[in-house]
Image: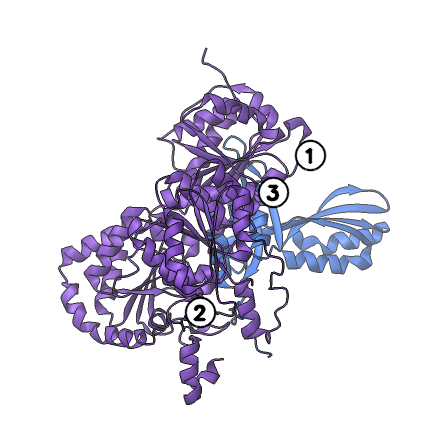
Chain colours: A purple, B blue
């Protein structure tokens, strides 16, 4: 007779077979049998967080920096509801997560039992799929299926809800069935004809641009390499979404910087004026497109994506290629080389005027700002942080707001999986727990959360997790005492009515750091910034860095609401210049 | 219009709205209907009617027929989003005007009236395959099968003849000829 295992044992056997090394979780009544079993599985390390939302974001950071699925373990009721924000965040940004939640025993489901909630009902709209395990014999299959669904096609979160009696019940265990038909439905659906059509468009174009997104990162490090080859082979300019940063080197000359609401002048104008737009693994998000009716009006549009429902969802495209980014690019470069079109040479002439135009836009220097000797400008702080950490393979996470955009603008990434930020959902409080997850995955690397003082307070408790596991994460707070992005919108669009965007009673972050048992550093003068950043980098413990910055600084350039790409608000320097010509007023 | 102060763009003009019938084959498992219905409500799509039942016990398959309205772009999204759901096997979409497909709804109509009126009511239903399921000397339950608008009209017309209660299904669909869906 085959050996019978308890539900809790089966959970761990599945995790072992799926090669899971770390899980992020928080115990409670309805998952105690699983926690009891933890001690028998030394290859799986559990990271105890301080709040289930933190577990979710930590698993996201882990997943995004490694490419492996993040695993979360929480209890029923509040444990499950607390993780909902993180699941939604992972769903929006296509991050593979497997969340295991405890549930009250089967016979109590539906009775409003203690710590009961309809977990599968609540998480249905924020997961790719979820399961309530009602029969112990289904558990091994469901667990393996959960990993498959989370990691294949367009990745995303899944949840397995396991009632407590199922954790005790016994059944046979079965290994993942490799031969079984893939659950994932979003596999490659393109053929050589599509690629030929793409190449035809590429060879005819005079003003082409690549617009790449998180899909390139999700497709694996290979995709980034292939992208670099394709870009250099074609000589086309390339811009990236927030999530795609790092897929292409940020300091390369063909890279125009990030596009979108706070993207560069050259990237947005190139998007507007191009005659061929090749979207690789991005989804025409509303922060990217601006006004839909005037989005890139003169271009042929190509969309390469693994998710068919992303195509024609917002922007109608002329050529759609459904498939894994690295497979599509690889076939494209192969075909390009085979056809010997000599694009490198022939294109250079054809698109030389285009590059001239781009260089003209570049002279605007849209990311420039008026620096100061007396007060730290937040952009300057990020620039210094970049200069002092760029040579040490640094991993950056962020919270959400102005600091996030400044980080995206001024920190130049040259490798994929080094940049973890909440883009789709825009979750304040993401960065600290995400940094915990990244550091768990990469214990020897430098991990920095570029934060704002409002966001950081949303999941501040997780610094305790960092201290417990000796995770030397660095929390770099650009402290302007405002919810800066809210304040900026209020200044520009709500007649400077700063309704509830000022934080009156902020904690002393240096003392707070000490209270948590880590190191606090404060910088308030530009002249001391470098030295303090060095001190932070050289501290082999968690650090909270309180960087007091200019309270009134706004994040520019910016596409105001309802405007197309070619009507950007530029920084104060340019506004000053435009005042004289009178052009600027039309923009504001 | 006042200047938009939203961080979001203003809606652009939308296309022509059509009625479509969407047929979905799903695993007959717990919560599958709420996944489908939740997708519609979550993304702001319309459901005009819904019919669902198991069609293959051995394969554990159910067939859901949804009548919905939307622009061509919205209908395309509905189909693609439905296809992403794990328990969904296949999705087929028809325009209401499609001549290759038969759509039918069923209604049970309770008439409380004297036998003369009941007879009149039955006559009025003649075009819609009426079946008397229950009859007393002051009441009758009549089953009819027809299109949505026809049933709407019948309900209106039968009111003076003693219609007191109507119960109706959503539309179900089948292709004409030997061709099969799946």
User: Disc 2 versus disc 3: distance between alpha carbons?
Assistant: 46 Å
- The answer to whether residue A30 is left or right of residue A452 is right
Vertical order, A465 against A340 (above or below)? above
Q: Residue at the location (51% across, 56% down)? A: A426
Give neighbour class at mark 1: few <14, some 14-19, many 20+ (Cα, 10 Å). few
| Residue B26 seen by the camera | no
The residue under label 1 is: A110
Q: Residue at the location (30% across, 76% down)? A: A363
Compare marks 2 and 3 and give the one earlier in the sequence: 3
Compare marks 1 and 3 and give the one earlier in the sequence: 3
The residue under label 2 is: A374
Q: Residue at the location (31% across, 54% down)? A: A390
A415, A16: nearer the viewer: A415
User: x, y (%) of residue A109?
Assistant: 66, 32
Label for residue A489? none
The mark lying in front, picked from 2 and 3, is 2
A463, A133: nearer the viewer: A463
User: Disc 1 versus disc 2: distance between alpha carbons?
Assistant: 62 Å
A262, B107: nearer the viewer: A262
Chain letter of the residue carrying label 2: A
Label for residue A81? 3
């Amino acid at each position: 007779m085959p050996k019978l295992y308890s539900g809790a044992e089966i959970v761990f056997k599945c995790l072992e077979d799926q090669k899971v090394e770390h899980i992020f979780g928080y115990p409670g009544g309805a998952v105690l049998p699983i926690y009891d079993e933890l001690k028998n599985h030394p290859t799986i390390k559990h990271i105890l967080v301080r709040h289930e939302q933190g577990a979710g974001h930590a698993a996201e950071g882990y997943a995004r920096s490694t490419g492996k699925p993040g695993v979360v373990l929480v209890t029923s009721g509040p444990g499950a509801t607390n993780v909902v924000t993180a699941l939604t965040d992972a769903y929006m940004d296509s991050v593979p997560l497997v969340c295991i939640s405890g549930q009250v025993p089967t016979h109590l489901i539906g009775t409003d039992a203690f710590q009961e909630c309809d977990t599968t009902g609540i998480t249905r709209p924020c997961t790719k799929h979820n399961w309530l395990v009602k029969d112990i014999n289904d558990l091994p299959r469901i667990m393996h299926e959960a990993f498959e669904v989370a990691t294949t096609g367009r990745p995303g979160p899944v949840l397995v809800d396991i009632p407590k009696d199922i954790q005790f019940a016994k059944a046979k265990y079965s290994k993942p069935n490799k031969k079984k038909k893939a659950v994932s439905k979003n596999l490659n659906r393109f053929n050589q004809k599509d690629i030929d059509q793409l190449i035809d468009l590429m060879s005819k174009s005079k003003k082409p641009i690549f617009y790449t997104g998180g899909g390139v990162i999700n497709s694996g490090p290979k995709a980034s390499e292939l992208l670099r080859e394709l870009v250099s082979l074609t000589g086309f300019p390339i811009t990236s979404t927030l999530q795609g940063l790092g897929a292409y080197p940020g300091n390369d000359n063909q890279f125009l910087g990030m596009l979108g609401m706070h993207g560069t002048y050259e990237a947005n104008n190139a998007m507007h004026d191009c005659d061929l737009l090749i979207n690789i693994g991005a989804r025409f998000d509303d922060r990217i497109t601006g006004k839909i009716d005037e989005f890139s009006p003169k271009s042929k549009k190509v969309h390469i994506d693994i998710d068919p429902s992303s195509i024609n969802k917002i922007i109608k495209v002329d050529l759609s290629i459904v498939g894994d980014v690295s497979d599509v690019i690889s076939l494209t470069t192969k075909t390009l080389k085979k056809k010997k079109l000599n694009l490198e040479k022939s294109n250079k002439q054809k698109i030389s005027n285009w590059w001239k135009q781009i260089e003209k836009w570049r002279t605007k220097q849209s990311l420039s700002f008026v620096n100061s000797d007396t007060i730290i400008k937040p952009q300057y702080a990020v620039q210094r942080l970049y200069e002092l950490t760029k040579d040490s393979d640094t991993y950056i996470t962020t919270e959400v707001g102005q600091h996030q955009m400044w980080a995206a603008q001024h920190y130049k990434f040259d490798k994929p999986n080094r940049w973890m930020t909440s883009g789709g959902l825009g979750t304040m409080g993401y960065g600290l727990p995400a940094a915990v997850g990244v550091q768990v995955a990469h214990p020897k690397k430098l991990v920095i959360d570029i934060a704002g003082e409002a966001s950081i307070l949303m999941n501040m408790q997780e610094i305790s997790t960092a201290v417990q596991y000796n995770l030397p994460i660095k929390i770099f707070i650009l402290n302007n005492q405002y919810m800066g992005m809210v304040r900026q919108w209020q200044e520009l669009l709500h007649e400077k009515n700063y309704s509830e965007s000022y934080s009156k009673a902020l904690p002393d972050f240096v003392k707070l750091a000490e209270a948590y048992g880590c190191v606090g550093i404060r910088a308030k003068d530009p002249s001391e910034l470098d030295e303090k950043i060095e001190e932070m980098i050289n501290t082999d413990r968690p650090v909270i860095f309180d960087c007091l910055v200019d309270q009134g600084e706004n994040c520019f350039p910016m596409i105001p609401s309802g405007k197309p790409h070619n009507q950007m608000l530029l920084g104060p320097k340019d506004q000053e210049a435009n005042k004289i010509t009178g052009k600027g007023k039309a923009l504001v | 219009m006042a200047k938009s102060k939203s961080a979001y763009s203003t809606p652009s003009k939308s296309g022509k709205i059509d009625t479509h019938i969407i047929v979905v084959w799903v695993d007959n498992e717990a919560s599958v209907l709420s996944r489908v219905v939740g997708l519609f409500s979550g993304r702001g799509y319309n459901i005009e009617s819904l019919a669902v039942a198991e069609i293959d016990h051995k394969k554990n398959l159910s067939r859901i027929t949804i009548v919905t309205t939307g622009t061509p772009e919205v209908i395309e999204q509905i189909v693609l989003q439905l296809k992403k759901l794990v328990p969904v096997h296949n999705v087929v979409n028809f325009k209401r005007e499609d001549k290759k497909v038969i759509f039918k709804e069923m209604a049970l109509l309770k008439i409380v009236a004297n036998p003369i009126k009941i007879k009149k009511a039955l006559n009025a239903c003649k075009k819609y395959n009426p079946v008397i399921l229950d009859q007393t000397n002051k009441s009758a339950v009549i089953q009819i099968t027809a299109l949505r608008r026809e049933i709407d009209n019948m309900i209106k017309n039968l009111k003076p003849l003693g219609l007191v209660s109507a119960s109706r299904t959503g539309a179900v669909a089948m292709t004409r000829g030997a061709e099969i869906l799946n």
